Image (tube, rainbow, N blue to C red):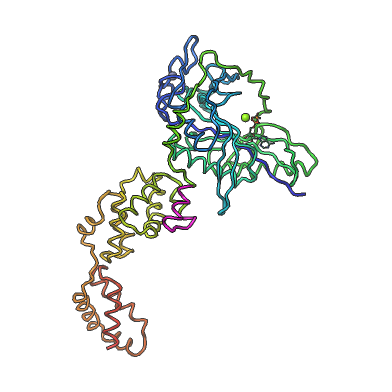
Amino acid sequence: MEFEAVIGLEVHAQLTTKSKLFCSCSTKFGSASNTQVCPICTGQPGVLPVINKKAVEYALKLALALGSKINLYSVMARKHYFYPDLPKNYQISQYDIPIAVGGEVEIEIDGKRKKIGLTRIHLEEDAGKLIHDERQPYSYVDFNRAGIPLLEIVSKPEIHSPQEAVAYLKTLRSIVRYLGICDGNMEEGSLRCDANVSVRPKGSKEFGTKVELKNMNSFKHVERALAYEIKRQIGLILEGKEVIQETRLYDEATQTTHPMRGKEEAHDYCYFPDPDLIEIQLDEALLERIKGDLPELPLQRKERFERAYGLSSYEASILTEERTLADFFEETVKIYPNPKAVSNFILTEVLRYLNRDHIDISQSKLKPAYLAELLELVEKETISITLAKQQVFPEAYERGVSPKQIVEERNLAQESSEETLKRICEEVLRENPGEVQRYRDGKKGLLGYFVGQVMKKTQGKANPKVVNRLLTELLEQ
Ligand code: ADP
Ligand code: MG
Ligand code: ZN
């Protein structure tokens, strides 16, 4: 029997607003525990929350970018449950009327496009964070995160493999970063994902019992957790057992999942409209303004890069994954209009250094003008590509100075003058009469040896093309 996996993802994206969703506390990451709190986000009685306009605008940005239908009128609701990191014992979220419904995320795997539909996008507040110390008989709670705005993006169960799930997540991450509404950092928890997964016999239209997976904080974890879970569920069915609806945690150490709790029914939360908050009312003018300000999205940009610059799908997809890198590429091409050369250098050298330093191009000291200048120096044969890669680029990258300046300071310019090089070539041949004889007797491989000698005398600065030609001419006389 063949099986098909059915996956639906619930993604939480932490919005990069300066203040929290209902109070003016800072959302800065990494501050000392409980230093970014106030009576509102710690749930003191009698306080009145007021919604953050920026957070609403960010929600609209994403919803409009994904083609969702905006509800001009939506409602904040209380979702009741008890947990020590939830100071009010309810979370302010959206329930029956979310800010947006529908829409889709278009993914690409091996050149094939696929649209994953969305159920809804809603706004809610984050909870605090429990910190467990194994050596203590108690845990700590940090409320700095309580009240930070989140967008929950719920996909339809239209994903059918762990690879598709990862592509969906990566695309969504890229989009929220393009829009500048979430930093997409999975390790710091600014982009989190719960994965719902079930299996069914291939061809069947009915859904199997789903399991919800939590605790995955990288793309790799999502992929491994889903792969394990799909196998586990198929195994159960083949043994004639039942899949139980539950929430399971992924454990990276064993790369398996284990039960956390049975799934609460939605009505357990006893949702009702928050009486302290007015409805969110939007007007068309705001939507039009936000729509007008939307940037070109990653997939469209990738398509344009292939078309306009003649890049391969692979090159274009890497260059457009981050908006800052795509901008850097285009800025460089404006100055040095050889897209292929710019792309090659970015994909190999630039990315190697950025990955090494775990930074974004915008955080580096490299400027488009520097890369353009460097490639021009290579094209004009002032320096060789090897020297450019090994010495000039690393220095331009580290120090943030112009390659021309480095070449001058270090006296790296290639020697291309025929006259000078001819004199040095003749000198080398004169000093190696034995080798010259052997060359003329047929040992043509010795040419490399002579070139090496010329390089030695010029500290590697001789233009190898010219040297090769000159030596051959002299030796064949
Ligand atoms: P719940 O109320 O349990 O949270 P929802 O209907 O809100 O369930 O769906 C939550 C997520 O689970 C959505 O992303 C949805 O696509 C996905 N989902 C729903 N049913 C299934 C299923 N049978 N198998 C896999 N995913 C599912
Ligand atoms: Mg759910
Ligand atoms: Zn606060």
* Nearer to us in this view, 161 or 222: 161
Report whether residue 134 is seen.
Answer: no
Which quadrant of the figure has residue 26? top left
Question: Looking at the image, which residue is at 39% across and 48% down?
Answer: 354
- The image shows residue 124 at horizontal and vertical percentages of 52, 25
Please tell me in which quarter of the rendered image ligand 3 is found. Answer: top left
Please identify the quadrant where the C terminus is shown: bottom left
* Nearer to us in this view, 221 or 294: 294
Q: Is residue 58 above or below residue 330?
A: above
Which quadrant of the figure has residue 252? top right
- The image shows residue 161 at horizontal and vertical percentages of 63, 46
- The image shows residue 438 at horizontal and vertical percentages of 33, 87
* Nearer to us in this view, 304 or 147: 304
- Which residue extends farthest top? 46
Whether 210 is among the magenta residues is: no
Q: Is residue 461 above or below residue 15?
A: below
Per the picture, the main secondary structure of the magenta-coloured stretch is helix
Report whether residue 173 is seen.
Answer: yes
Q: Is residue 392 above or below residue 272?
A: below
Which residues, given as a range, are shown in magenta?
300-315
Question: Looking at the image, which residue is at 29% across and 60% down?
Answer: 376
